[in-house]
Amino acid sequence: MANTLTGLLPTIYEAMDIVSREMIGMIPAVTRNSTAERAALGQSILVPITTPPTLGDNTAAVTAPNTGDQTVNNVAMTISRSKHAPIRWNGEEQRGQINAGNFNGILMNQFVQAFRALTNYIEADLFTTAYQNASRAYGTAGTTPFGTANDLSDIAQVRKILDDNGVPQTDLQLVLGGAAMANMRGKQSSLFKVNESGTEQMLRQGIIQNLEGAAVRNSNAVKAVTKGTGASYTSDTAGYAVGATTINLITGTGTVLAGDTITFAGDTNKYVVLVGIAAPGSVTIGNPGLLQAIPTSATAVTVGATAVSNLMFSQSAIQLVTRSPQMPIGPDGRAMDMADDVIQVTDPYTGIVFDVAVYRQFMQLVYHVRLAWGFQGVKANHTAILLG
C-alpha cells in the first residue's frame, strides 16, 4: 500500500507550529508523560513520582557508604479522554478548490483547527483539575490581579501560599487568564523598561518570561468559575485542629462545589474545596488543611463569589499523560484498522504525539487527527489560586 500521508507532513507540521505558538499555557506548564505508545479509554497508566533522598554524613571510610536506595512512588493515571478531529473532502469539493488554487491553504488551516481543538480540550481539562485540586486562594473575586500600576504584590502573595506550604523553589508556573495578563502588560511598566527588566522582550514582543521565580504563561482556558449555591452553613461543634482537611458543615443549604473557596469566621485564609456537598455534610479542603483551628462552637462558613481562577503551581503538581488511541490488534500482532495510512507526529513544543490517519471512502476521503489522554492534580499543597 502506498504511503498516502508522507506528502502532507510539511502541511501537518506547519499547522502544528502555528498552534504551538498560540495561548497554550497549561500544557507546557504541567508535567507531561507523552509517548507514541497506544492506550485504551479507561486504561490505567502508572506515572513515577520520585521522592527526596535521605542525606548522609560525609565520613571518611575504606569503601563508599552502602546507601542510596529509594522507593519510587507512582500515581495511577486513567486515560479518560479519547478524541479525534475529522477533516473530510469529496472529489467535487477538492477539485473545485484545487482549480481555484485554494486547496493547500484550506487543508493546512483545517489541520490547524484540528490540532487547536484537541489542545484546547486538554487545556480546559488541565485548568479544571488544577483549580479543583488547590490548597488556598489569594485575591478578591471580581477584581483582576495586577490592576495597580507598578505593583506585583499579587504574585508575591500567591507565591507566599506555596512557600508556606513548602513547595520546591524550582519549576514554579504562573498561568494567567487574558484579563490578568493584560493588566500585567499594560500596567506593570517595570516589565517593559529595558533598564529595569534587563530585556526588551516585553516591550517589543509582549513576552513575559520568569517573574519572581515563576514561568509566566497565558491560557485561554483560564475562565471564571461559577461558585456553588451554598449559604448559611456553619461548622458543627466538634472543633477542628490545625491541619484538619475534613470539616462537617451543618444548618445551611445549597451546593459547595469542588474548586469553591470557603472561609471560616475569624480566619482570613481562603481554603479551596476538593470534595463538596449538595446538602449539609462533610467538605474536604486541600492540604495542608486548616492553618487556624476552628473552635468547638458553630462557626460561620462563607462560600466565595464567582471568580476567575488564575493559577500558580509547581510543575509536578499537575500531571498529563498522552497516548495514541488504541487500535485493534490483527492476527500478525500489529495494531490495525481500516485506515489507508497512519502516521504519528510530535509537537516539538509540548512533546505530545498525535495520530494522523486517512481513510478512503466512497468518492471521498477523511483525515483524523486523534489523541488519548488523562490528567490529574496530584498535589493540592503545591497549587494555589490567584482570584480575579
Image (cartoon, rainbow, N blue to C red):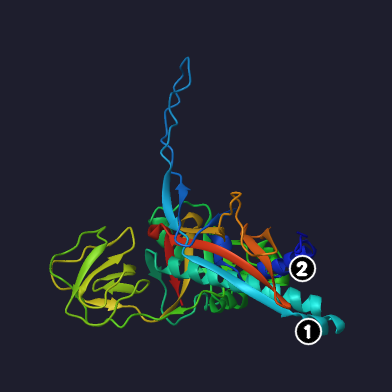
Going by the numbered disc 1, the residue's amino acid type is Glu
Q: SS at mark 1?
A: helix
Q: Nearer the viewer, residue 153 or 379?
A: 379
Across and down, in percent, residue 74 comes to: 42, 48
Residue at left offset 82%, top offset 85%: 96
What percent of the width, then of the height, locates residue 59?
A: 44, 22
Name the residue rendered at 60%, 74% in the picture.
Answer: 117
User: Which residue is at 78% across, 84% downward?
Assistant: 92
Q: Is residue 359 or residue 122 the one in the foreground?
A: 359
Q: Is residue 47 left or right of residue 261?
A: right
Residue 76 or 338: which is nearer the viewer? 338
Q: Earlier in the sequence, mark 2 or mark 1?
A: 2
Q: Is residue 192 visible in the rendered structure shown here? A: no
Q: Position of residue 11 (x, y in %)?
A: 77, 68
Where residue 340 sits, quadrant-wise, is bottom right
- Residue 166's spot in the image, x, y percent? 40, 52
User: Where does label 1 land, which residue?
Assistant: 92
Q: Label 2 crowding class (10 Å Cα cut-off): few <14, some 14-19, many 20+?
A: some
Amino acid at pointer 2: Thr
Q: Is residue 171 above or below residue 195?
A: above
**Which quadrant of the view contains residue 245?**
bottom left
Q: Residue furthest front?
A: 331
- Per the image, label 2 sits on a secondary structure element best described as helix
What's the residue at 24%, 71% (across, down)? 266
Quarter of the image for the N terminus: give it.
bottom right
Between the residue at mark 2 and the residue at mark 1, the CA separation in whole angstroms equals 22 Å
- Nearer the observer, disc 2 or disc 1? 1
Q: Which residue is mark 2?
A: 11
Q: Which mark is residue 372?
A: none
Q: Residues within 10 Å of mark 1 (few under 14, many from 20)?
A: few
